[in-house]
Amino acid sequence: MIVSKSEKLLAMIMHISQIISIVLASSIIKAVFIQEDTLFIAPVFTGVLIPFIIWKLNRTSDFIDSNGKIIFNWGLTTFLISLVSIPLLLIQVGMYLLGLLYLGTFIFSLIGAYKSYQGIIWRYPFSYQFFKSV
């Protein structure tokens, strides 16, 4: 499969948006603890809407389509793990699970961005395949 430079760049932006959402989410958590007003929609916009818009507008590209599915598979996987982790916060196990989830998202998004810019389709480890990609 021949991948154009613009497809590589768009796929990289999709992966990088996951990292930006982590940074915004952590700043929102910090702001909540110190009672500041903040914009709560920002992590959702960067982590979900930016990849979704790029994915939907460029679905004719197999490369963009595969990267979009990979990102949303990871997003759904992390959402489900987060739901399990929330009750486990009471016994402090959830804190470690959520920390590992943030760290995994950060590392996997960096690797995904790097690989996508090289034109390689890379699946996130430990991600359940809700959407089948190429």
Image: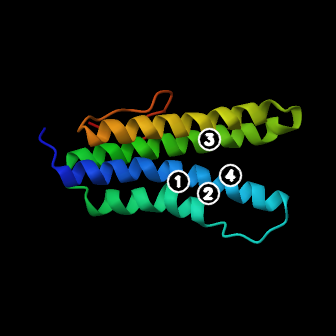
CA gap between label 4 and label 2 equals 5 Å
| Residue annotated with mark 1 | 20
Q: Do residues under tags 1 and 2 come within 8 Å of each other at their CB atoms?
A: yes
Instruction: State yes or no: discs 1 and 3 in contact (Cβ < 8 Å).
Output: no
Disc 3 secondary structure class: helix
Q: Amino acid at mark 2?
A: Leu
Q: What is the CA distance from the residue labelled 1 to the residue labelled 2?
A: 6 Å
Residue at position x 53%, y 40% in the image:
106
Residue wearing tag 2: 24
Check disc 4 and report the residue beneath it.
26
Q: Are marks 4 and 2 in contact (CB under 8 Å)?
A: yes
Residue 89 is left or right of residue 75, and the answer is right
Secondary element at tag 4:
helix
Alpha-carbon span between mark 4 and mark 1: 10 Å
Give the image location of residue 84, x and y in percent.
Answer: 71, 37
The C terminus sits in image quarter? top left
Residue drawn at (53%, 53%) of the image: 20
Look at discs 1 and 3 and give the one toward the viewer. Answer: 1
Q: CA distance from mark 1 to mark 3?
A: 20 Å
Looking at the rendered structure, the kind of residue marked 3 is Leu
